[in-house]
Amino acid sequence: MSMHLHRFFLARNLFNSVAPSTRYFARHSYINKVSLYLRRARLIDSIRLSLRSNSPGSLTPLLNDPALDSFVVTNALKSAPSPDSALSLIETLKSVPHFSHTQNTLYTLAKILAKSQQTAKLKALIDAINSGKFTNVARIGFMDRMLWFVAAGDPDAVIRVWDEWRALQKHPCAESYNIVMGVYAQMGKSTEAVKIFNRMIVEGAIPNSRTYTVLIEHLVNSGKLESAMEIFKTLPLMRIKRTLAQYSILVGAFTSAEQFHLVKALLEEMRIDGILPGRAMQWALQRMQEAGFVEETDEFVKDMLPDKRIKNVGFHMDDDEEEEDEEEDADHKSCDVAVDGVQLKPWLDPAALASSLHNWGPEEVSALESAKFVWTTRLVCKMIRNFKSAETAWQFFCWVAYQPTFTHDVYTVSRTIAKLARHGRVDLVDKLISKIKREGIRLPFITVRLIIDFYGISGKGDAALKVFSDAKTLCGPISKSGLLLLYSSLLQTLAKCKMDSDALNILDEMILCGILPDVQTFSGLMHHFALQGDIRMVQRLFGMVRQSGQEPDAYMYKILIRVYCKCERAVLALRVFEDMRNSSLMPDSATKQLLVKSLWKEGRLREAAAVEERSEQINAVLPHTLPEHAYTVSSADLMRVYNIYSSSFTISEAKIANFSTARSDTSSVMPKVDVFAFGVVLLELLSGRKAMEMKENGEIVMLWKEIIGISEDEENREERLGRWMDPNLESFYPIDLL
């Protein structure tokens, strides 16, 4: 390990806690944050150019600049032209006495080692960090290690880390399942990838947008374009946001297959979703234009072409007098191409620039104007996304509107209005909406939904109702499926804002308009009223589901059982349990335990024992948890997606495990219940304990399960049985008869 690390670090660099750059900025405290950002950006550009030059000695003077800090080094490493050049920068930093590495620089180095597949050095670095060799650097988490080993092309290490994680935490985050599923897909182990998706659902990890990106990419790479498209079309009704990555995968695949009509449809849906195309789509769009689809792609192609207004950064190796021109060049002023050096576009980090504008004071604005940035739609969208404050985002939005050659469009307006809604700035949202109406701008449908959803987060239910009433004006005609999603978002927002009467009125209006709420919407409302203990409303909503001809799923039954138990109506919960069984469904283990506990508390010993027995007879291993899908995804949706995915690889073992259903022949269960209940009473008499007890940690202990464990322990059976028996019997019983 030390052999590998020695090549990158010297001890005096690693543990030096006093950096001259700190003293420099303390002496120059008058420099505002935007000016500081620009100075750092120019230094990063100079390092980038030096790494691309043929003069290794040009790097050392730059690294002795007082402005050098971990931010500069981190971003210089990220933008290095190759892993070798990045590692040469790390090597040169050894000669800089005032620089010490931080978590950011070390993690960036780890990513570089991973991408260059230098696995031995990567593992040595991980071991060094986790052993505490670097002060003020936290241990590396499981997720980072998994991501690095994926980049390093070491699938065995990825699986090993995941197993280690699961040993400590039974159910890790959803992204870890995504990573492992993607690894198996890349290895061509489709069966294993399908099993991980199954496992993800069974163990209660809710799939997210990244999950479906992995599925779609796997299917596309396996030549299953129709299956990939089928899953993609299902996502909106599952309330899953479709991403640029998913669009890029599908557009590229259908372009290669010369199915340009499908590419055209995808591009139109991108506009509806308010998504700007990425650089990866440029080839596909050019192919589309060659095939005659010029009008449909022209807007997207223009956006991806290099902006000629953005000048290059020139680097002259020999003439130090060119420094001022280089700084002007980075600020996008006109300049000539350097003869002896190289060129590249100026370094720009929208997140860091947005952070420097947090205060939005006169000095910051002046520095920003002096920088003469070329503002494009994409850059402005990234800036707005990275502002932490809605007020700063609004000030920037208004300021940039007056900058030369820039005009706001539907993308920048959508991004801004969503940001303002998330922070509850109804007044500013109303201003933008008024302007949109005057100028005839049509917002993407997804933006209108986001405004309503975000008003739920910020507690602005009345404002959400107003936006909903203007929806058709804001985004044009809305399909029936779109109205379903919009109504569902509004109902969720009203529920969050505790506007129950308004929510019920909207529900009635929805049904009168011929828009039937789906299971997710009903589940969300049932969950909301269940939390308030409103049994009648929960019952009414459950009845509406059945009247509408829809089949309640396991999660809906779960809500009903839990609300009855909460209100000490365990008998009613038991009836729901029976209805659930008759529908070939079973609750998860936690809900079953709650039902048993509630029956026991209400003195229903026989019924509690019956639930235990039936659960054991039907499914020895109940699902750990049922996927919760209030307002979002239903078990039926997950089943449908799983079946599409698994059937695409024709594997017999890829049958969905019980995350929503558990079927069996229950005709033989009832005759055994009375015998079982009698046995439980007998165990109570022999042990002097209750048939069911609860430990301090909430775990329920069953006598009948304990006695089974004792009987299976052949070596210590007699000793354990003696301890288990009621001590009041004082051993006056023949042990061989027990």
Image: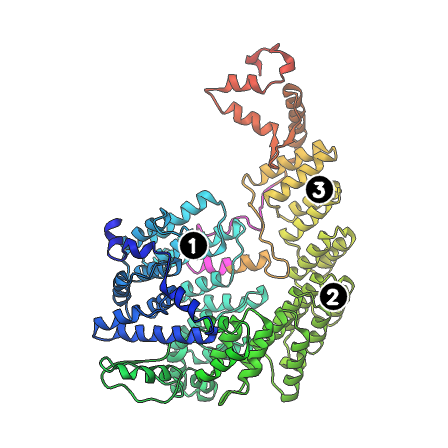
Quadrant containing the C terminus is top right
**In the foreground, 313 or 126:** 313
Q: Which mark is residue 507?
A: 2
Amino acid type at image mark 1: Met
Q: Which mark is residue 574?
A: 3
Mark nearer the N terminus (1 vs 2): 1
Q: Residue 720: where, in percent of width, then height?
A: 53, 20
Mark nearer the N terminus (3 vs 1): 1
Q: Which mark is residue 143?
A: 1
> Do labels 1 and 2 touch, CB within 8 Å?
no
Q: Residues within 10 Å of mark 2 (few under 14, many from 20)?
A: many
| Above or below, 540 relative to 23 | above
Q: Disc 3 on helix, strand or loop?
A: helix
Amino acid type at image mark 2: Leu
**In the foreground, 154 or 48:** 48
Q: CA distance from mark 2 to mark 3?
A: 29 Å
Quadrant of the rendered image containing residue 325: bottom left
Mark 3 vs mark 1: in front: 1
Quadrant of the rendered image containing residue 340: bottom left
Mark 1 vs mark 2: in front: 1
What is the span of residues highlighted in magenta in the rendered image?
A: 642-665
Q: CA distance from mark 1 to mark 2?
A: 42 Å
| Above or below, 285 relative to 715 | below
Q: Disc 1 on helix, strand or loop?
A: helix
Q: Is residue 650 visible?
A: no
Q: Residue at x 51, y 79 (%)?
A: 363
